[in-house]
């Protein structure tokens, strides 16, 4: 396994206090976050409904950190332009919802935004083999998407190792991201499996000390 050049911690605002969202983002920024992960859920592809482009636009005004926008939507192509205009730095779509994935990835990149593709826990890695050379980010879900606070699915570690191997063997310039159930107690094993970006929601936002939690994660991932 080729060690990642840099590892990043991306707090997921799904678990933040939305009544004080700007303050929450300021706190995790001060605590050492590398990027802000934004979960967009449409109530169709996943059983929850969260935020849209206006919230992303508002977040963009209060942070200089990269915005990592994860679209859990049945029709992401209808909203890509709006999320780009709102200030997204990364836009990640699900392979399960994109029959014309290559075209969508290219349309995102043409706007100067990094493009990613996401796999649900049961979706095989083979579904992204043909697109891997085109994307900037591969996101492996380690829970079934839709809700925060779920437990990490242990079998995803092996999937993550295989994803790392696939990226390295192709020499692809792809960041490998993991999302779901990431906490201080398991982040070291996840790092050893090859992840570059660690999305963590409740483990950070439900902790008493954001800085202490992020620092412990950073120490664990090396």
Image (spheres, grey):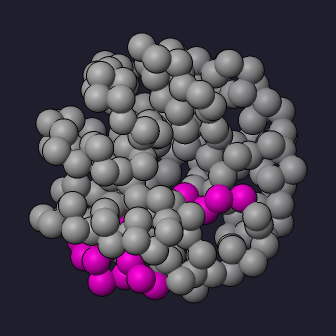
Residue 193 seen by the camera: yes
- Estimate the x, y position of residue 56 in percent, counting from the top left: 59, 76
In the rendered image, the vertical position of residue 121 relative to residue 26, given as above or below: above
In the rendered image, the vertical position of residue 34 relative to residue 2, given as above or below: below
Q: Is residue 76 left or right of residue 112?
A: left
- Estimate the x, y position of residue 47 in percent, counting from the top left: 32, 64
In the rendered image, the vertical position of residue 192 relative to residue 78, given as above or below: above
Q: Nearer the viewer, residue 129 or 35?
A: 129
Q: Quadrant of residue 143?
A: top left
Residue 154 seen by the camera: no
- For the record, the magenta segment spans 65-82
Q: Residue at x 39, y 54 (%)?
A: 116
In the rendered image, the vertical position of residue 26 relative to residue 110, given as above or below: above
Q: Residue at x 76, y 64 (%)?
A: 64
Q: Nearer the viewer, residue 132 or 177?
A: 132
Location of the C terminus by quadrant is: top right
Residue 120 part of the magenta segment: no
- Total of numbered circles in the picture? 0
Q: Residue at x 76, y 33 (%)?
A: 213
Residue 76 part of the magenta segment: yes
Q: Nearer the viewer, residue 111 or 57?
A: 111
């Amino acid at each position: 396994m080729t060690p990642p050049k840099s590892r990043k911690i991306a707090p997921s605002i799904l678990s933040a206090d939305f009544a004080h969202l700007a303050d929450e983002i300021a706190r995790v920024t001060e605590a050492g976050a590398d990027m802000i992960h934004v979960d967009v859920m449409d109530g169709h592809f996943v059983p929850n409904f969260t935020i849209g482009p206006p919230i992303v636009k508002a977040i963009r005004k209060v942070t200089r950190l990269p915005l990592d926008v994860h679209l859990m939507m049945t029709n992401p192509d209808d909203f890509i332009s709006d999320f780009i205009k709102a200030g997204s730095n990364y836009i990640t779509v699900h392979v399960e919802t994109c029959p014309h994935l290559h075209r969508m990835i290219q349309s995102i990149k043409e706007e100067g935004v990094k493009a990613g593709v996401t796999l649900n826990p049961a979706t095989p890695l083979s579904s992204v083999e043909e697109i891997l050379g085109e994307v900037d980010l591969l996101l492996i879900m380690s829970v079934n998407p839709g809700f925060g606070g779920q437990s990490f699915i242990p079998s995803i570690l092996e999937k993550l190792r295989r994803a790392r191997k696939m990226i390295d063997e192709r020499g692809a310039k792809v960041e490998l991201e993991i999302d779901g159930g990431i906490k201080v107690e398991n982040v070291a094993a996840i790092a050893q499996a090859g992840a570059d970006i660690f999305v963590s929601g409740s483990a950070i936002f439900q902790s008493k000390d954001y800085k202490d939690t992020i620092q412990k994660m950073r120490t664990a991932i090396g």
